[in-house]
Image: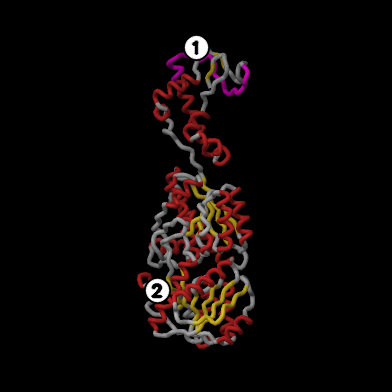
Amino acid sequence: MATSSGPVEPVGPVGPAAVISGHQDFYPALLEAPDSIHLLLEITTAFVVKWLAAQEAVDGPFKRIAIADYNDNKKEGIGMKKKAGKELNRRTFIKTSGAIGLGLAASSFGVPTLLRAAPTKIKIGSIQPVTGPLAVIGQGQRKANIMAARQINAAGGIKSMGGAQLELLLGDSESKPEVGRQEADRLIKDGAVVLQGPFQSGTAMAIATLAEQRQVPFVMDVAALDAITQKGYQYSFRVFITAKGLVGGAIKYLKQVTEMKGVMPKTAVVTNTADPFGKGMSGGFLKGLEKSGFPIKIIDRIQYPLGIQDLSTEVAKIKSLKPDLIFPVSRPGDSVILTRELYKQRVPLMGIFCPGSPGWYEPHVVKDLDKLILYVLVNVPWVNPNSTVYQKANAAFYKAYNQILDTNSAYAYTGTLVIADAIERAGSARADDIVAALKKTNFKDHPVVGGPVQFNEKGDNIGAMTALIQVQKDPDYLKRVKIVMPKEFAQSDEIVFPAPPLWER
């Protein structure tokens, strides 16, 4: 700073830096993005040095140049150097820079015009169930989040923010809603500006409440329970389909299959895990089925805890009821136990029709159950095998992890892409800017069945839809799951229904 013998008046690099970045952003960024602020201060320091040199060349040597002084007294500042000549003060600085314009002055001395400080890294909190009964799914979700972030960074990062890189902060819900909320809170404290995840609807509900309190955007890559987005939250957005959407798809495809095959089941049993999603999805399906007038009688609803290890009692009850169909809402663990027990007890069925849940299409489940899982029909949000985005992402996922990009991991991948798209359009990592951008999302370049990702006033994706898949014979177990409806996405024209008994395959 340059001074007279009177009170010290600053014309150093901090003032211009704060003007350039915006005062309200500058001081928080000292803590949140120190690398960016350091770079900005280097630029403004160079500008001030050149500007002072130019001023001195015009007006002659300064009387004093102070390194720094914030004393309230009238003593000479620390590091002051007395020189003969004219005085340069804040009024002169403002007058001169105002006359030529700060941007022009900056560019005249080789300094970028009105550089806005941008974080070098944008932190995204990914909370997935990587341990516990949903670990297999959660680990795939996390891998997909990571791969998407890496691809975005490799492609130049967030270009509207100078190539800012995405940094994933990883959390593990342990398949428990209360732990998921704790992990989300931890990641927010660690600097996450957006949250994503978490597969489980119960965990999503807990995180959505926290996100609203902390005013942090939350993008649900997978979570279907309707109630999550029915509380008027402003910071929560769902890429996945709602339970209501799942129910609608299930009833539509059930009608189409029975009409196509000319076979009408008379009775059915509903089974579900007793967690929020299991209860909500099966309950919604029962209500939707009744409202639709579909002529099938539900003779029982059997519920059991998530993570159960033995379903022999439940299957014995199913056998005694002699249903034509089972409508299971399950997870990978209990679906395997249920199928093996149905085989063991030789329960005769026309088929298994899943209205919408995991546990029937995951590669490890298909490989493990082999012939026993053939001909299961599942209504589910699914990957679009005809999509170039899916084909490239699937190839990359398989190369990186020796796994295919299934529907859950594909939605996790999509969630990260949607977040990056919103930040790119916002040109900002501020919560309200990201929320505003999310509300205007129209994201088409994704790998799943459905239209563009667009959020309604509740935060639900109106472009989300389901497909009907069936596990069919193929020497390669990775190719056994095929879309059979709708026609525009179908990979097989054949639908096997009724299915042969489990023990005759």
Tag 2 residue: 485
Establish if 36 lies above or below 423. Answer: above
How far across and down, in percent of the image, does residue 448 sit? 43, 64
* Circle 2 Cα neighbour tier, 10 Å, few/some/many (<14 / 14–19 / ≥20): many
- Give the SS element for disc 2: strand
Q: Nearer the viewer, residue 431 or 414?
A: 431
User: Can the viewer see residue 50 in this picture?
Assistant: yes
How far across and down, in percent of the image, does residue 240 sit? 47, 62
Indicate left or right for 385 with 355 as reference: left
Establish if 5 lies above or below 395. Answer: above
Q: Amino acid at mark 1?
A: Gly
**The furthest residue to the left:** 488
Q: Amino acid at mark 2?
A: Met
How far across and down, in percent of the image, does residue 227 sit? 53, 62
Kindly indicate whether the residue at mark 1 contacts the one at mark 2 (C-beta within 8 angstroms).
no
Q: Nearer the viewer, residue 249 or 298?
A: 298
- Give the SS element for disc 1: loop
Q: State the residue at coordinates (56%, 84%).
A: 343
Q: Reading the chain from its start, which is encountered first: label 2 or label 1?
A: 1
Q: Nearer the viewer, residue 147 or 129?
A: 129
Colour mapping used in the image: secondary structure
Q: Nearer the viewer, residue 487 or 235?
A: 235
Residue 55: say if magenta: yes
Q: State the residue at coordinates (43%, 24%).
A: 97
| Residue range highlighted in magenta | 54-73
Disc number for residue 85: 1
